[in-house]
Amino acid sequence: MGRYVVRRLLQMIPVFIGATLLIFLMVNVMGDPIAGLCGDRQCDPATAAQLEKEFGLDKPVWQQYLTYMGNVFTGDFGTAFNGQEVTELMASAFPVTIRLTIVAILFEIVIGITLGVITGLRRGRPVDTGVLLITLVVISVPTFVTGLLLQLLLGVEWGWIKPSVSTDATFGELIVPGLVLASVSLAYVTRLTRTSIAENRRSDYVRTAVAKGLPRRRVITKHLLRNSLIPVVTFIGTDIGALMGGAIVTERIFNIHGVGYQLYQGILRQNTQTVVGFVTVLVLVFLVANLLVDLLYAVLDPRIRYA
Amino acid sequence: MPEPPIEPEGAIASTGAGGAMDLATAEGETLEKNPLGPEGTGPREKPRSLWSDAWRDLRRNPVFIIAGLVILFLVFISLWPGAITWMSPLKCDLSKAQQGSQPGHPFGFNGQGCDVYTRTVYGARTSVAVGVCATLGVALLGSLLGGLAGFFGGAADSFLSRITDIFFAIPVVLGGLVLLSVVTSNTIWPVIGFMILLGWPQISRIARGSVITVKQNDYVQAARALGASNSRMLLRHIAPNAVAPVIVVATIALGTYIALEATLSYLGVGLKPPSVSWGIDISSASPYIRNAPHALLWPSGALALTVLAFIMLGDAVRDALDPKLR
Amino acid sequence: MRGATHAKWTACAVAVALAATACGGGDDDGGSGGDTSAVLSASWGDPQNPLEPANTNEVQGGKVLDMVFRGLKRYNPETGAAEDMLAESIETSDSQNFTIKIKDWTFSNGEKVTADSFVNAWNYGASLKNNQKNAYFFSYIEGYDQVHPEDGSKQTADTLSGLKVVDEKTFTVKLNQKFSTFPETLGYSAYAPLPQEFFDDHSAWLSKPVGNGPYTIQSYAKGSQMSLRAWEDYPGEDKAQNGGVDLKVYTDNNTAYTDLLAGNLDLVDDVPASQLANVQADLGDRYLNTPAGIIQTLAFPYYDEKWDQPDSDKVRTGLSRAIDRKQITETIFQKTRTPATDWTSPVLGEEGGFEEGFCGDACEYDPDEAKKLIEEGGGLPGGQVKITYNADTGSHKDWVDAVCNSINNALDNEKACVGNPVGTFADFRNQITDLKMSGPFRAGWQMDYPLIQNFLQPLYYTNASSNDGKWSNKEFDDLVDQANAEADTAKAVDLFKQAEAVVRDNMAAIPLWYQNGSAGYSERLSNVKLNPFSVPVYNEIKVG
């Protein structure tokens, strides 16, 4: 068990190097970012050359990568084009995004799994159909529209929330954005849980548990749910990284200055330092989340063992 | 070949409170043995495969028939959109922008003054093709790689899973701008290829998790004990029982791929104008939801119908593959 | 039809829900007095560059500089005329040597504004080693070649030889060519004076810039908010009428607009296109839509021989006549754009060189003529035009699609015109710089200063910095040179208009529309105005 974790932690090193190299190359392939800095105007060649030198863009790519990685290990993630240090950007963006992700994940766990259990136990009943219809709406109406309508209804008409999130971005303010962010994933979690529950409720250990006279709630939570959670946990595990890095639309609607926005801006402005810096941290999040999910497998299903 | 870390033990959960910390005790727990259940692995009077059983079931399932008819209809209008429309989807008259329904134009007009009905019908081809092909590709590639990783475990698992991790790390926007901007072809294939390339890791992890659970089951152990080959175990015993989560995720992902096509088009790297698709129409109508909701409603409705048909289809297939429901 | 009824119902429901929102809020009678200590909040975008005057080339950073700095001249917020601000006098006898005297003035940290404050700032801005993106503004000053060698060779001087400090309040400027309207350009923020602190402790200054304008920066949280407060001892006459401004960074103007509706924000200076149709219902008369010095055009790649045929001008004129500007500006832009009829901007005024209808028939929508002209010109090169634009900023897709539909309808050919989006602005600019355009492309121009020269020379002069299509015309160049040397303003304007006529006769670029500035504000505010640069005149806003 301990050795397994150590082995997994060691495996992170090649993944880390591979992913950063890949992203670094990809941003470089996009071409020269300097031309975008001068507005609808040609940068004068001398200034452009000078800027290239300052950002190290005049060197060969491999050399840029090595310099960059060397700096990263000393904690220097470089500077964005507006003169702000990338570590500073990360320090302001990650805490907000982490809070937002926590809210979204909680919604997925609480609402998603609850709805999944209910619909799984009542397949074909009205409640199942109702949830299916909501699922369809969530999938086919863009997050942009749901977010906007919620914002207008709750924020402007009813005045329950502030339409935009303040710089502090407290948990309270992030409830609605978190729900919007989680909406599509909620559809996945609900349907995954539903299917698993429906599949397992007829299995022998549930029948045995029922036959033993265990109370229904205990059968559902201890036996049925626990054995149905593996696909759900897997999905949520993969979703953490996606939610953190891909909340572009939600962050825009509610004016949250988080990771999704910074990453998106960095990509559009082809700012290698920002993009690689943020993705590097996200890769670590992916790796840790996946490790946790794999460990959870063994908790949920004791037959699974890691040597 | 690495030894799969399998202990043929039963499945009943521990009574100790959940919590991540009782891994150690969980491992050593003694378990109730399931008797060889009616799972269909036992000898039957006629050795019929699970797959043909499933097909026999499906043909009688009304849900399957309805879903099939809807999908056939979608295929029909994708192939012959002219059969139920009477004008071109590219004929737009700005003076009619955002107008509602009127004779000859049942769904009204969008922000550019194009006929929403015609565009919704013509959009089916691109959207259904992108959605179905990308989903199939992602599901096949993802479940193949994930399934193998889960089945063999050990080094194979480590290798495949770490590759998955690297692919997870690529932001869609960055990938799109880099990989698709070099493409000059104006077909849907580069877009589909891109979606498969970035989409498979998710299904792969789901499939892996599912296979890891299923392979612990007694019937798989029994098959192994009887000397079944790896491929036989995978195809006949594991795949049918592990496929449910993959189907669920894939059918929902179908809808998101159709929407993703629009995102890519908006980034300027998806389908080149003047393409017609639901995704493009949905995202261009979205900002104008206050003034012209009908322009959003119809393409969204079409997308919802498509996803519904595939969810129903997926459900029916899953049920057919589950002998416990018979 | 059942479906259709349903759609209509939804439309109404949404409309009702939203109409109701517009009716909220108290009804202050909002007297004209205003509370001079009250602070208002306004929308802002994250500046792209560090907030140095000579490094800020976009509106968002420009907004702040406009509040924190005052230069030698200031453009009148209403007329756009360049008026003396810190300048006591700017004198010249030959349009090439200028003597500038400045008034008594201080920076908000107490330091005196002297001739050195200007000369040092300009030297800093021009010097290659400081990477200032507006360095080219100093390129008319003698010695620019040495401090900023174009070919990237080593700079041989740190200071501009054309700048000389005479005494504490006087300095002279020598230009490398005659430029009669040079004094009028001095209102641009790149020419602002800088305090000594800027040079002594640069990073401290950058984190909290100090200037000499009506506002001082109280706090600046990069990426989220800047709090500006009225400077009590401001020596100028355009003292702030309010207590201060909190600029809040919004990543999406739609959110800012919603915040305005909800009463969380006082001023939005960029109303999203999708909300323009609702603005009357939402805000009533608390909405501004005033002309700004911005013109949108379609430029052509003259380096591509397909577009440089003898008869190409007929094709271009034909395309111009196939665009229904009126319909597009009314429907897509809800009248926040005005169909263009010349190549300048209405904010210049008749005296400044703007002339309505200067373009004549060539900008009138006429499908039949359009078809005929394009046929006469040999048809569309390659049978199809692709309008290239960048997809990442602004909603260019909407109007490019509308322009293409208009052309397609006029020419009766569904494939005549298609949009060609490019992923990022940087890529778009790179394709332009590398001469890779194969058809018309989006060209927008926001003036730096309200002079007709600024609408013509940078865009159409041979090899000028924004002449993206590489159009080149000897006659035009000669006329511009003459105009620049002409000391009499009226005569200079006249020469510039003759140059503009050359642009017109060749249809060097298709003028599309003039862009307006738009803004919405809360009931707390009064006397809100936008200047010709589409920036709110913050210091005149009254609160309460």
Image (spheres, rainbow, N blue to C red):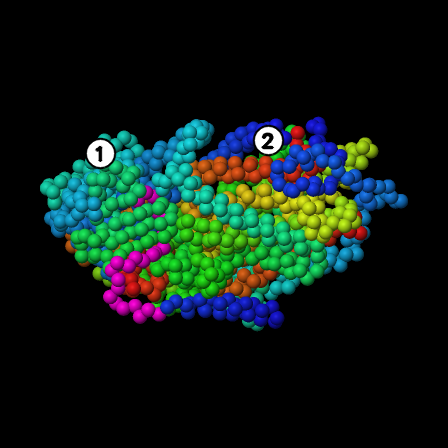
Residue type, mark 2 in image: Val
Q: Nearer the viewer, residue A174 or C299?
A: A174
Q: Let me know if residue C36 is in the magenta part.
A: yes
Q: Secondary structure at mark 1?
A: loop
**Disc 1 versus disc 2: distance between alpha carbons?**
59 Å
Which x, y percent locates residue C491? Answer: 18, 56
Left or right: A234 as drawn, with respect to A204:
left
Left or right: C65 as drawn, with respect to A178:
left
| Residue drawn at x 69%, y 46% as measured from the top left | A222
- For the question of whether residue C302 can be seen, the reply is no
Chain letter, disc 1 residue: C
Q: Are marks 1 and 2 in contact (CB under 8 Å)?
A: no
- For the question of whether residue C543 can be seen, the reply is yes
Which x, y percent locates residue A18? Answer: 53, 32
Tell if the residue under mark 1 belongs to the same chain as the one under mark 2: no
Which x, y percent locates residue B205? Answer: 63, 40
Main secondary structure along the magenta-highlighted residues: loop
Left or right: C375 as drawn, with respect to A297:
left
Q: Secondary structure at mark 2?
A: helix
Q: Nearer the viewer, residue A307 or B236?
A: A307
Q: Nearer the viewer, residue B32 or C129?
A: B32
Quarter occupied by the N terminus of chain C = bottom right
Q: Report the magenta residues as a range.
A: C27-51
Judging by the rendered image, the residue that carries numbered circle 2 is A5
